[in-house]
Amino acid sequence: MRALEELKKHLKPGQVYRRSDLEQWSNAVDRHLKQLVEEETLQKVSPGLYYYPVKASFGSVPPEDEKLVRVFIKSRKFLLNSPNFYNSLGVGTTQLYNKRVVYNHKRHGLFTLGGKVFDFRLKHKFPKDLSRAFLFVDLMNNLNELAEDREDILRKVKEKVLKEPEARMKRAVNAYAGERTKTLFNQWISEEILAHV
């Protein structure tokens, strides 16, 4: 019992832990984890992954997506995204998706963490933070995954993209666009130049 209390001293509310993180403070980590889950000090969020919930007046606060992903892939190098963020661009996307996309260098596939599904995608390059220019590029890269009328969205994206600062858009396209997106963007720029000749 004393060993379990000793382990508890190292746990902080709101944190996500790997089983391996807790081995340094426990001589019987599996038994202690089982006890901590049974007494609801910890919640199991995925095989080998545990969360110490923050208590609020309405119950336990779920773990932050960022913390879940960081501990799961053992890296800070990732970008959390969602098709829902496209709705902020004003291009007619209104659907709400129960989907979180994680661009990263380590994992690929669908993983359930804390009851949420994360779509991990291996990418060589992605920005540190989401930007408007990146979201336009990402939307165009993933257009086939959207439920809305693609032609209509593409027409609206073209209108909006041509009003964005050109240098910023070019940087985002060159860094993160797939071939189809690059071709489309360059075609739009050429048409815009010709229209003003």
Image (cartoon, rainbow, N blue to C red):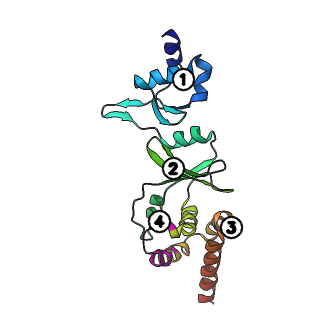
User: Which amino acid type is shown beneath numbered disc 4?
Assistant: Leu
Q: Is residue 147 magenta?
A: yes
Chief secondary structure of the magenta span?
Answer: helix
Looking at the image, tell me whether mark 3 or mark 2 is earlier in sequence order.
2
Relative to residue 129, is residue 13 drawn left or right?
left
Relative to residue 104, is residue 32 drawn left or right?
left
Residue that numbered label 1 is attached to? 30
Q: What is the spatial separation of the Cα atoms under label 4 and label 2, in whole angstroms?
A: 23 Å
Q: Secondary structure at mark 4?
A: helix
Q: What is the spatial separation of the Cα atoms under label 4 and label 3, in whole angstroms?
A: 20 Å
Classify 10 Å Cα crowding around label 4: few (below 14), some (14-19), many (20 and above): some
Please say if the residues under marks 3 and 1 sit with CB atoms less than 8 Å apart: no
Please say if the residues under marks 4 and 1 sit with CB atoms less than 8 Å apart: no
User: Which amino acid type is shown beneath numbered disc 3?
Assistant: Asn
Closest to the observer, 100 or 37 = 37
Residue that numbered label 3 is attached to? 174
Could you say where residue 192 lies in the image, as x and y percent from the top left? 59, 83
Q: Secondary structure at mark 3?
A: helix
Residue that numbered label 4 is attached to? 89
Looking at the image, tell me whether mark 3 or mark 1 is earlier in sequence order.
1
From this view, report whether residue 98 is shown above or below residue 47: below
Classify 10 Å Cα crowding around label 1: few (below 14), some (14-19), many (20 and above): some
Closest to the observer, 152 or 161 = 152
Residue that numbered label 2 is attached to? 118
Name the quadrant of the C terminus. Answer: bottom right
Disc number lying in front (3 or 2): 2
User: Which amino acid type is shown beneath numbered disc 1?
Assistant: Asp
Q: Secondary structure at mark 1?
A: helix
Q: Is residue 126 magenta?
A: no
Which contiguous range is marked in magenta? 145-157
Q: What is the spatial separation of the Cα atoms under label 3 and label 1, in whole angstroms?
A: 48 Å
